[in-house]
Structure formats: structure tokens, C-alpha cells
Image: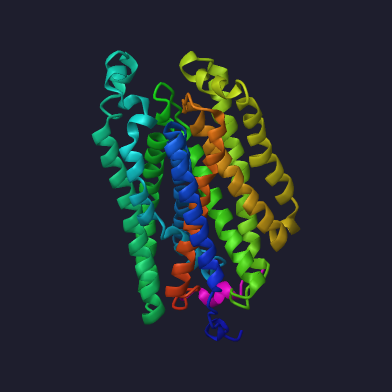
Amino acid sequence: MENKSMEFVQKPLPESVLKTGIILLIAGVVIGVIGLLLDFDRMIFSYLIAFVFVTTVSLGALFMVSLEYITNAIWSVPIRRIMEFLASALPIIMVLSVPILLSMHSLFHWTHTEAVANDPFLSGKEPYLNTTFFIIRVIVVFAVWSLYYFMVTGNSRKQDLTKDQKLSHRNLVFSAAFIPLFAITISIFAVDFLMSLEPHWFSTIFGIYVFSGTVLAGLASVTIIIVMMMEKGYAHPALRNDHLFSLGALLFGFVNFWAYIAFSQYMLIWYANLPEETFWFLARWEGYWVVISLLLIIVHFIVPYIVLLPQPAKMDPKRLKFISIWILVAHLLDIYWLAMPQMHSDKSGFYAIFEIGFPIAAVGLMIVVFAMNYKKFNIIPVGDPKLQRGINFRI
């Protein structure tokens, strides 16, 4: 078949894309900062939610990069750079963890010395749940993710120039080593930033629960971008809806996987009926939280399941774009559901309207990161030996 990979000329993105990202970023930060001044206790939780959201989007994309290399996938090669671009936010996000580290006393009950001293349960967890070790874990976790990102993307970009096939093999080796580290680090991240908000509660399946949402968020973000690029003519002209099928199938698969893990966690705790486990769920079935809990089931599982169930839907650009945006909103709701019940504020509930600020800034940040990467690097890995087969991929 005729080689079409070299015929592609990358068109510059409209300046409006970067400007939109900057506007959202600035507007979100301004709204968030005003909220912090009015109700710090509430808004630092909002900041944490936005931080976890943008981390999971980037980390989910990075996981997809590693998965492509270790499975020797063909279909995803032409869109791998989108995953790399999204993952490039991780070193920046590490810096964004500083406000959380400076506000740990407002977020984490286990940082209160007097509470730990009077609570045997917290005293038993003190060797792990202490400020110094928490900061060390944050640095190590983000260092592992960033190191893998720099190594694998460095080789990928170098391959654009050298066409050296050995670089693909090196990335395969790096990815094989990264996967077990990824499993450990994402579990640490989930426990530290989300589960330890309620230090008396624990779940052995919580790391997998956060993993399922992380991969789903990364997949949804990649899907939105590639569909929009195909619609606007910025993707490789040889890409077809066939390339979307695997993204649609993976979205459908992880929607079901998330629901399975969520139900498994709930069922095991409900069946055991231990007070030290059930209280966490009972808090989410009180007041308006019962509405959010039921809404989460509908938004995060039932609607995506129905939309993605027919096989043609997995190749329909409009439907994929809609459901990907829907899934990202559902993912944000999921993080809100995990974190916000631990928030205690004596201020007026009116200030809750400022909670939209930091999530808006998170969306703006991802747009800025993508636009800047698009300007600097090829949108397709022109030196990858599998690229032509990936472009020719058909269902």
C-alpha cells in the first residue's frame, strides 16, 4: 500500500485554542482564589478535587502510552502523541501539589497532633500517616511518573529524527518496568490524597477503584481531542472511524470495569457490615449526598453503558465526543463524591458556587499544555516503524 505517512503536513492550531485555555486557566484561578478568601476550608477541598482530576487525566494518558508499548499495539500509534501531550502535564502538576502540602492541616485530620494522641487507631497509623513521610511519598510518586514520561517521550521524539527502531525496544523495556511501579504509585496516590481524608476508614480495593477512573479519564480526554482534530482537519487525513473503534471499545470496557469495582467495594463492605467500614458509605447516604450517590450511578455507569453498547456507537465521532465529555464530568463528580463529604465548614453554603473555579482552571491548564506541545512537536510519531501499519489500520 502506498506510504502516506510522509504526506501529512501538520497544520498550526488556531491561536484561539491557546487563548481559550489561558482564559479558562486565569478565570478559574481568580474564582478559586476569591473562594479561598471567603471560605478557605471549603475551597482547599475544591482545589484538591481539581488537583486529583487533572492528575488522573494526565496519568491515564501516560498509562495508555505504556500499554501501547508493552502490547505492541498498532492502531494507537498515529494518536500516541496526543497521549504524550496530555501526560506532559505531570511535572507541572507536581508543582501544583505544593498548596496541598502547605494546607495539610485543613485537609487531613491525621495531621492534628492532639487528635492522634487521643486516638489509638490514628496512633497505630502514625508511622505511615505523618507529614514528613507524606511529602516524601508525593515527591517519589511524581518523580517516578515524570522520569518515565521524560524517558519514553524523549526516545519517541528522538526517533522522529533518527528513525532508529531500537528506541521502540527501549521504550518497551521502560514500559514493562513502569507498569508494576504504576500499580504501586497510583495506589499510594489514591490512599494519600483521597482515602486518608477519612483516616479511620480503609478499603483494600480503593487503589483499583481510582485506577479504573484514571484510565477512563485518560481515554475520554484522548478521544475528545482526536475526534475534534479529525473533524477540523488537523489529524492525519488517512485516519478513519476505524481508528476510533478501539477507543470506543476501551471506553465501554472501563465504564463496566469501574462499575464492577465500585459495586465490589460496596458489596464487600455491606456484606461484612463492620462499623469501621460501613460509616464511610452511610455518610454518603445522608441528606443531599444520597442524591449525589444515586446520580453517580446513573451518570458514571448507566448513561455511558447505554450510549456505548451498540457497536456502531464505538465508531461514531459525534457520539464518542459527547460521551467522552460526559465521562469526564462524571469522573469529576466521582472525585467530588469521594472527597467532599470530609469537608467541614461553618460558612454559608452560598460559597459553594466558587467550587467551580479550580476545576475550570484544570480544564484550561490541559488545553494550554496540549496547545503548547502541539506547537513544539509532531502530532504523529513519524519515526515509529509501526506508524504506516497504524495509519492503514482498518476494522
Q: Is residue 363 above or below residue 122?
A: below
Q: Quadrant of residue 228?
A: bottom right
Q: Is residue 107 above or below residue 240?
A: above
Q: Nearer the viewer, residue 384 or 290?
A: 290
Q: Which residue is at 27% across, 24% downward?
A: 126
Against 324, residue 300 (above or below) is above
Is 140 one of the magenta-colored residues? no
Q: Left or right of 286: which side holds 195?
A: left
Vertical arrangement, residue 116 with respect to residue 330, above or below:
above
Question: Which residue is rendered at x = 59% and y = 76% of the image?
Answer: 236
Location of residue 24 in the rendering, given as x and y in whole percent from the top left corner:
52, 56
Number of numbered markers: 0
The reply to whether residue 316 is in sight is: no
Q: Nearest the camera: 325 or 147?
A: 325
Q: Determine the residue positioned at 63% across, 31% down.
A: 292
Q: At which x and y percent is residue 277?
A: 48, 20
Decide if residue 380 is on the left or right side of residue 98. right
Q: Is residue 147 visible?
A: yes
Quadrant showing the C terminus: bottom right
Please tell me which residue lies in front, 228 or 275. 228
